[in-house]
Image: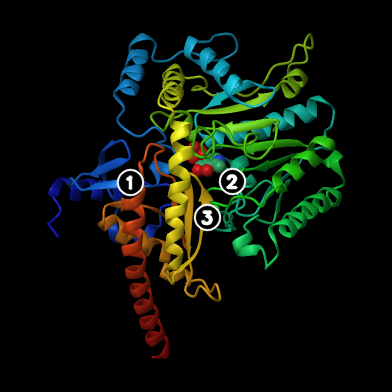
Amino acid sequence: MAEMSTETKAIIERDKRHHLHPYQVFDAMEANGALPIASGIGARITDTEGMEYLDAVGGMWCTNIGLGREEMVEAIADQVRKLAYSNPFTDMTNEPSANLAAKLAELAPGDLNHVFFSTGGSTAIDFAYRLIQLYQGTRGLTEKVNVISRVDAYHGQTFAASSIGGKPGDRIPELQFLDNIHHLSSPNIYLYGGGLSEEDFADKLVAEFEDKVAELGGPEKVAAFFAEPIMGAGGVVPPPANYLKRIWEYCRANDILYVSDEVVTAFGRVGEWFVSETVFGIQPDIITSAKGLTSGYVPLAATIFSDRIFDVISDPGAGRYIPIGFTYSGHPVSCVAALKNIEIIEREGILEHVREVGPYFMEQLGTLRDLPMVGDVRGSHMMACIEFVRHVETGEPYPDEIDIGHRVSDICDGLGLIVRPVENLNIMSPPLVITREDVDFIVATLRKAIPLASDAAERAMAEMQDEFDD
Ligand SMILES: Cc1ncc(COP(=O)(O)O)c(C=O)c1O
């Protein structure tokens, strides 16, 4: 392997010393540093040493239309020249944010006609949480404050969003969380189905939800339910059939708001603008979105909510106001990027492309099930994950220290493929524009990497055992 250039070494060193990364693992960072990426085009990124990778993670579930699009560059640059910023507060607006809000109201299901802009998925969730409080409080329902979420859910990083999240690894004792959020079982049938049929598992989850509402004192004490339609960071978990729809029906019948977190699933990842209604038959009260909204070119999030909520919080004639706002709400540059992104998705038929290539991606990944270490392959269209186990027959996982997801992804890096390691998983959410040939490359590379990682893991475990015996 060629010696790394002094420029790259310097970047890695500066980064190590001064840049704290999201989810940084301190010892690994100290030992290895981070991989510096210099450029990207379409689904491919290139590091500072000139090595090219197919980015099967799509940045962080977000580079939907692919990187380096000239017309995006032009749209963003034109808007910066014309109006780089304008105050969104109270009674001032700009054309891109008005146009984008109207476009999102058109694309979102049902009566979700109102849009609040912020900068990322976490702030979209945080706003949804506070909107719910405002809605219930304005109706005088001051005891309707509990929120129901699920174990393994991921909703972001603000205080409210991290409290609603339920990934066990995120809920460490050193941090504090809101105590009015209650977490039900994850809908991951592979890990927690206990041999039940999909239907029986769904029955169990719905019964658990209804029992929780009763335990909290009935619907009068429950403000809302938050759920990703397909869990993402918690392990790419398509829900059992009808489970979400049945919970939504219960919420509707019992005056509990339903928040569908579509930060990952919206804008084409599953071949739809939004999946709540089209795929799952749910008409949520609130949808949160970000990521694919601008395909990651610039930060933007949208919380889209119903006429029903707007009518209550605005309460005509009562002189109410909303005490929530961000400097960068409705940023004109971000809104122009989102409008251009949506235009490109429409013009190029990217949703149709995902409906065609997405099933091929899932089917081809599925062929990896014949490898001894592949316990499960799951997902939908352009969101997928592979779960690694030590023994498929028993489902015995690798010990945490083996960090099997990382071992596979490190080998893939060397072969020009980026996949995302999360515990025993490799998660993939490629740019939506990948081709069948790209899919073939991803699967062929994993087919090489997985057995190599498995051999290395076994050797490491044997060494651990030897050390233990000594
Ligand atoms: C479903 C979901 N909601 C919210 C978020 C938080 O988004 P952000 O990182 O943009 O704050 C994420 C991020 O991955 C997500 O997957």
Kindly report which numbered mark, 2 or 3, lies closer to the viewer in this rendering. Answer: 3
- The tag on residue 378 is 3
- Which residue type carries mark 1? Asp
User: What amino acid type is highlighted by mark number 2?
Assistant: Ile
**Foreground of the two, 288 or 134:** 288
Quadrant in which the C terminus appears: bottom left
User: What amino acid is labelled 3 in the image?
Assistant: Arg
Q: Is residue 322 visible?
A: yes
Check the image and report above or below for 193 versus 456.
above
The yes-or-no answer for disc 3 within 8 Å of ligand 1 is: no
Label 2, on which residue?
A: 230
Q: Nearer the viewer, residue 85 or 463?
A: 463
- Could you say where residue 208 lies in the image, as x and y percent from the top left? 78, 55
> Quick check: 227 above or below 27?
above
Q: Earlier in the sequence, mark 2 or mark 1?
A: 2
Which residue does the image show at 24% across and 43% down from the upper left? Answer: 46
Which quarter of the picture shows residue 31? bottom left
* Quadrant where the N terminus is found in the figure: bottom left
Point 64% across, 45% down: residue: 164
Tag nearer the camera, 2 or 1: 1
Q: Secondary structure at mark 2?
A: loop
* Crowdedness near tag 1: few (<14), some (14–19) or many (≥20) residues, C-alpha within 10 Å: some
In x, y percent, where is residue 178?
67, 46
Q: Tag on residue 438? A: 1
Question: Marks 2/1: CA distance?
Answer: 24 Å
